[in-house]
Image: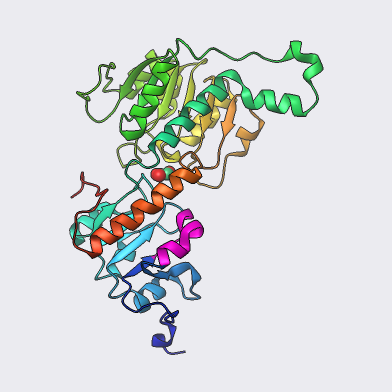
Amino acid sequence: MAVSDHRQQNDGRSPELPEVIVLNAPLILTMFEDQLSSKFHLLKALDSELPLHQFLAVNAQSVRAMLCTVNGPPVTADILQLLPSLRLIVTTTAGINHIDVSECRSRGISVANAGDVFSADCADYAVGLLIDVLRKISVADRYVRKGHWANLGDFPLGSKLRGKRVGIVGLGRIGIQVAKRLEAFGCSISYNSRKKKDFVEYPFYANVCELAADMDVLIICCALTDQTRHMIDRKVLLALGKEGVIVNIGRGAIVNEKEMVECLVHGEIGGAGSDVFENEPDVPKELFELENVVLSPHLAIFSPESLEDSRDLVIANLEAFFSNKPLLSLQDPFF
Ligand SMILES: O=CC(=O)O
């Protein structure tokens, strides 16, 4: 078949709809495809029989906007090179670690993310994971299901949330909401981030290891960058200590997962709750055996309501772009 024969067939929609290349399969596309495709002509790389590079080379030379998410092929310099007309990437996620932002900057491509639409759900989930690890709610659930209730005396009691010293790593949109929630639960809050924040009174620690040494709990809420990759390593975990709990709703690779698993297996930290892992969907099997660990499949941000907000923001960003208006959630640190 000639290369030009591989061009996606016009599916009957108006040829005037602006074209958007869809690199992978964002959940909002699965849920709201009709709404998105009534406004944009979606060129879906996943539906093509062609390998991604060839699909882009054949179909996407004039495409100016891309929709993507964190699962699936990362938006690398190699991919961007195949899209000479691209000027906008909209990611359905808050995190943008799957996009080569410095390549975007040098090519004049703007990046818009999920802004604040997932922050509340994600913060709720972080608190949920922490309460679950501390009070052993999932353990209690398994206990009842196994018919052990009659022996209640042998249930290992969990630890109180009120009074815990909680260190938030990354006091951005999500971190601040976690902090406010846990303050209301009677915890004392401290934080680590790139810079001290003027809008809060919480104690600031420039050094994450010193933060861990003074805390009962660390909650990882920062972005994954070259600076934060494996920032939470054995040294930090040992500083957190035998009773210390770590919760991660950021990205798996912020924690050195191998070292965290070793610390958990050897009882060098008290417990962990994690929604994110280094090599998703693979989760280290050792964790399955541990009762002081709560595992979740990268779902913290999702509720039906947050997905609808995400859809609306994606559409609003694309519409703004195609009508030369300012983007609603432009990633300004980079542009
Ligand atoms: O992980 C999810 C997100 O970055 O929004």
Find out whether residue 244 is within the magenta segment: no
Q: Quadrant of residue 89?
A: bottom left
How far from the left and from the top, in percent, is residue 2?
Answer: 42, 90
Residue 26 part of the magenta-drawn span: yes
x, y percentage for residue 168? 37, 24
Quadrant for ligand 1 reads top left
Highlighted range, magenta: 22-37
Compared across the picture, whether 106 is left or right of 140 comes to left
Can residue 7 be seen in this snapshot? Answer: yes
**Can you see residue 291?**
no
Q: Please name whichever residue, 156 or 235, is drawn nearer the observer in this view of the structure.
A: 156
40 and 167: which is toward the camera: 40
Q: Residue at x 42, y 40 (%)?
A: 251
For residue 10, above or below residue 186: below
* In the foreground, 247 or 201: 201
User: Can you give x and y, in whole percent of width and height, for residue 91 in the image?
Assistant: 36, 53
Residue at the spot 32% in from the left edge and 44% down from the top edge: 115
Residue drawn where x is 22% and y is 28% of the image: 195
Q: How far across and down, in percent of the image, does residue 237 sit?
A: 45, 23
Q: Quadrant of residue 301?
A: top left
Q: Residue furthest bottom?
A: 2
The image shows residue 172, relative to residue 201, as above or below, that is below
- Residue 25 vs 40, above or below: the answer is above
User: In the picture provided, is 232 more to the left or to the right than 316?
Assistant: right
Q: Which SS does the magenta portion mostly show?
A: helix
